[in-house]
Amino acid sequence: MDATPINPDAEEHPYQQIATDIVRAIRSGELPVGSRVPSEATLIQTYGVARNTARHAVEYLRAEGWVRTLPQRGTFVVERVDPADENE
């Protein structure tokens, strides 16, 4: 995955910048549904952030419905349902 460097002067927190970068990769097809999201260790090394920042980014993606974490297997991109479509 091509990573966009963290901008310390941006209004978004670093975890949000990482999440935005991963969402960009998902939307572009670089990380298709079913593919494994980089591990926390990889995110730490790639973005030069603390473990809590990497963890928060993954938690945010999970809460937003972009990924699912399977214990002892990793975190994977899932088919995302648009909340607007659920009401139809």
Image: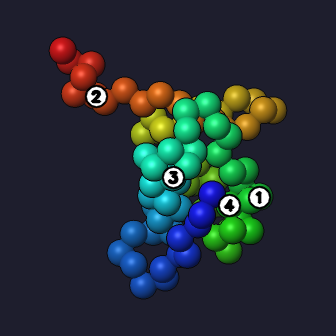
The 10 Å Cα crowd at callout 2, few under 14, some 14 to 19, many 20 or more, is: few
Residue type at numbered disc 4: Leu
Q: Position of residue 5 (x, y in %)?
A: 55, 75
Residue type at numbered disc 2: Pro
Residue located beneath label 2 in the image: 83
- In terms of sequence position, does the residue under pointer 4 or pointer 3 come before the other? 3
Residue type at numbered disc 1: Ala
Q: Nearer the viewer, mark 2 or mark 3?
A: 3
Picture residue at 64% right of the left edge, 37% below the top: 35
Q: Position of residue 32 (x, y in %)?
A: 55, 38
Q: Position of residue 80 (x, y in %)?
A: 42, 30
Q: Which mark is residue 25?
A: 3
The 10 Å Cα crowd at callout 3, few under 14, some 14 to 19, many 20 or more, is: some
Is residue 40 depicted above or below 31 in this figure? Answer: below
Q: CA distance from mark 2 to mark 3?
A: 21 Å
Q: CA distance from mark 4 to mark 2?
A: 28 Å
Residue type at numbered disc 3: Ala
Residue located beneath label 1 in the image: 41
Q: CA distance from mark 1 to mark 3?
A: 18 Å
Quadrant of image for the N terminus: bottom right
Q: Nearer the viewer, mark 4 or mark 3?
A: 3
Picture residue at 69% right of the left edge, 68% below the top: 46
Residue located beneath label 4 in the image: 43
Q: Secondary structure at mark 3?
A: helix
Would you say residue 19 is visible in this rendering?
no
Is residue 62 depicted above or below 25 in this figure? Answer: above
Q: Report the residue that reaches farthest toward the bottom.
A: 9
Q: Secondary structure at mark 4?
A: helix
Mark 1–mark 4 CB contact (< 8 Å): yes
